[in-house]
Image (cartoon, rainbow, N blue to C red):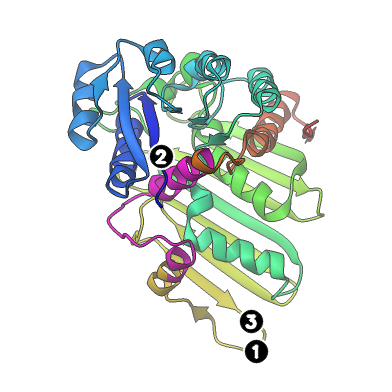
Amino acid sequence: MQSEPVRVGLIGAGMIGQGHAYALRLLAEDGEVRPIAVTDFSVEAVDSARQICPFERVAADAQAVIDDPDVEAIVIVTPTTTHRDLVRAVVDAGKPLLCEKPLATSFDVVREMCAVVATSGLTAQVGFHSRFHPLINELVRLVSTNELGAPMGYTLRDDQYWPTGDVVPGHSSWRSQRAHAGGGALLEHSIHSADILSWLFGPATSVYARTRNVFGYDVEDTAVCTIEHDSGVVGTLISIFNGVRGREERRLEVFFERGAVEVTTDFLVGAREDSFLVQRPDQEPERLDVAALRDRHFEAEGIARRDFFVYLYPAARAFVRSVRDKQAASPTFSDAFTAHALVDAAYRSVDERSAAAVERAG
């Protein structure tokens, strides 16, 4: 007997919010979600979200979504500065939540939010959708199984077009303002990479970083970090916001005792950038069939449909199933703390012009 669908409210219907709306629509078609309410300060954004997903009603504001007795779980997709109050309000209402990244513009607030969620015991997930990428999962498997020996070091290059209206006409511009975003390429974009690196190699212990503001905004568009992990693995991260409209690529090279792996990804499912190369001793480099790898991963996860375009769908699916089953969700707010702690140490390193220790949870 199939369980009742999880009744979901969406707070925030901008560009990313509409991506979440599409994921919720697919889950509604799957019988796993009932989309109840949506809200945004933009009437046009709400209209677009409702064209994508059949929300039953438009709420006057975020609190109305949270207080709606028909809404069982909340998805928060609003600018970073609003997350703190919204997460606290949802926790006060005793409802499960999924909050987009970054959690907050300052690490002090992240620390506070994680403590509030941990104390609540509620099912709570953070929007690190790269954890649902099949290629990243295959790399995690290689690290965890020791198939190529122990990981030694890595280099990760993470670049994207500047998500601001000055570079991409019609795009929102709050990410180029420190007061609203808290940081630039490193916090707003490469918090995903901070999470991936912590997932692969364990929490970071120290970071040495430098940044630049080439475009002239008050947040960085260039960041370079040397990172040491508790596991002993060392690596470099370079994060870039550039003016190459349409470009969005992450390339991670990991060097093992008995192999080297190069993984390139984009946020889109089946992106042209996707590739996975493995070099073993005395062998020609092996380029994996990424389409076959992706299908195997989805099949293993029980995902039958293929009509989703970003990894928001499997992330949302994992969340609503955790809510339905009253289980902990993943990635957690504790995972977000670990990623934010790495980024915070990088910013402190820039200010202090020396290596900075990374704060550990608990």
Residue at image coords 57%, 16%: 88
Depth check, front residue: 212 or 297: 297
| Mark 3 residue type | Arg
301 within the magenta span: yes
Coordinates of residue 119 in the picture (x, y in percent): 70, 23
Coordinates of residue 36 in the picture (x, y in percent): 31, 27
Per the image, label 2 sits on a secondary structure element best described as: strand
- Location of residue 123 with respect to 37 vertically, above or below: below
Q: Quadrant of the C terminus?
A: top right
Left or right of residue 352: residue 37: left
Q: Is tag 2's residue or tag 1's residue first in the polypeptide sequence?
A: 2
CA gap between label 3 and label 1 equals 6 Å
Depth check, front residue: 238 or 74: 74
CA gap between label 2 and label 3 equals 34 Å
Per the image, label 3 sits on a secondary structure element best described as: loop
CA gap between label 2 and label 1 equals 38 Å
Confirm whether residue 178 shows in the render: no
In this rendering, which labeled residue sits more in front, label 2 or label 1?
1
The residue tagged 1 is 282
- Residue pushed farthest front? 1
Mark 1 Cα shell of 10 Å, populated few (<14), some (14-19), many (≥20): few
The residue tagged 3 is 280
Residue 242 is labelled as: 2
